[in-house]
Amino acid sequence: MLFNSSGYSGNLRMNSTESLESERRTAGNGRSGKLCSAPVEDLVPNPGPDAPSLGHTDSGTISHLPDRQSGSRGEITSAGSDLRATDNELQLWVLASIAFAIFYANYMIAPLVPALSREFSVPPRQLGWLIPGYLIPYGLSTLVYGVWSDWWGRARTLVSLLFFAAATMILISFSDSSRTLVAARILSGVGCGGIVAIAISIVGDRYPYAVQGRPMGRMFGAIAAGIGLGSSLGPILNPIVGWRNEFRALAVVCCLGAVLVLRSDGPVISPNRRATSIRRVIREYLVVLDAPRGGRTLAFIFCNGAFHGGIFAWLGLLLARRYHLHDIGIGFALVGYGLPGIFFGATIGRWADHYGRRYVVPLGFLWAAGCAFLLVPRSTRFIAGLAITALSVGFDATHPLMSSITTSLNPKHRGQITGLATFANFVGMGVGAVCFQHLIRFGFGIALAFFASAQTLSGIAALYAFRRERPQMRSVPPVCDTQCDTQFVAPS
């Protein structure tokens, strides 16, 4: 079943039980030749409902795992592991496809600003809120959808949002004026918000922090593909099929994704049916911000989003003014943006798992800053295209890894915390787009130099802030800083 609860923690617990049983037999034979009369279950402490798991299940006990059959423990463990591995891979591809469609719809708009300006006969500055008008509502809505997915269930919330997003994309395709288009984009931000955040929460539910690099790399590789193809194929297809038909096709993809989720038998993780007050939700958000790992990671996510979102929002206009390119030319110039994430996203994630995020994340900040500095002077189209392609590597080496840190903070409220991280990222992108728009009046070179300098300072600060993000042992569960209701995983 594609979206059923998996039992990674339960499998780990079963293996621990077998190991203890073997040790008990050995100890008993050494003392009196008889087995100890104490049951094996008494030797394994019960973590209780509030204890943290590795981030995949609610309690990690065998009794909570579905579809258990009697028989040999080794056979059940082997068969269950193979089935769960297959389900996890299928689920990962479905979630990656959904994330691809959402980001394709988002990133195809920025390169189309010159074309939309001509179509609606308005200057580009009047379309300035097309990008931040989508990003800011997107980020704000994730604060609500993350909490809702924790209470109502991941799959149900995901299906509802996919149908909502499809409806808003259809509405965008029928816009007949610039004001209607901006209003529809704002509504689309509300509709699409939370979809990718819930998908990331599902990945956090299924995989422990120590091995999240590969699945997170695949998820953000799909996001990078949506970014790359949306920014390149979107404007290329505009003269052929039209941007309106592109949005209609993406609405169909969202509906198909919702159908695939509906065909499953249950949610990925059991929802928390306990009623949660608004005051409690706000208090938990504040606790996340007060935690050292939570507060600093969210701050860097915001700054990183402001940098990448601000520059990309106006790359299409930069290429149109500096190199006099039209839709197809802009599309080919941006064709490399996002491609490194497709081919190297999982590899970068494995590097982070092996060497630690303390090295990879700061290097990603500094790499992106260097690429932005390369765009400051006027150069050939080829060099500009290479710099734009390399710029996306900085995103692939920072945001996925910082997102995996946030998903490890509190497994009980992973959807809520992931929503907070997505809020920081998209609001940062929206703020960055507005700031870059105001800096353009002084020239694209000055705007790029300002953003690149700020990213360089962020990279230097990241060297200190992430110095303790070392690789974790896969066989050792995370250690909690506290035993209260809101628990945080400390790095090893």
Image (cartoon, grey):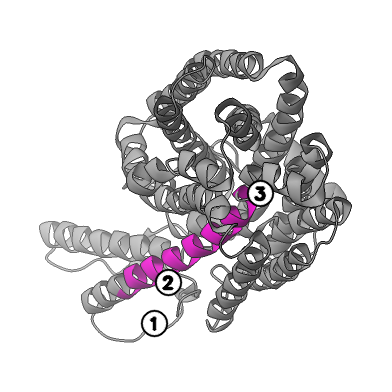
Q: Disc 2 to disc 3, how far (Cα)?
A: 48 Å
> Which kind of residue does numbered mark 2 sit on?
Ile
Is residue 231 depicted above or below 446 in this figure?
Answer: below
Q: Which mark is residue 62?
A: 2
Is residue 388 depicted above or below 375 in this figure?
Answer: below
> Which kind of residue does numbered mark 3 sit on?
Ile
- The image shows residue 113 at horizontal and vertical percentages of 69, 43
- Residue 287 visible in rendering: yes
355, 217: nearer the viewer: 217
Quarter of the image holding residue 18? bottom left
Residue occupying the point 73% across, 38% down: 427
Callout 2 crowding tier (Cα within 10 Å): few <14, some 14–19, many ≥20: some
For mark 1, what is the residue? 68
Q: Disc 1 to disc 2, how far (Cα)?
A: 8 Å
Question: Main SS of the magenta segment?
Answer: helix
Q: Earlier in the sequence, mark 2 or mark 3?
A: 2
In magenta, the rendered stretch is 83-107
Q: Mark 1–mark 2 contact, CB under 8 Å?
A: yes
Q: Earlier in the sequence, mark 3 or mark 1?
A: 1
Q: Earlier in the sequence, mark 1 or mark 2?
A: 2
The mark closer to the camera, 3 or 1, is: 3
Q: Which quarter of the rendered picture does the C terminus lie within?
A: top left
Q: Which mark is residue 109?
A: 3
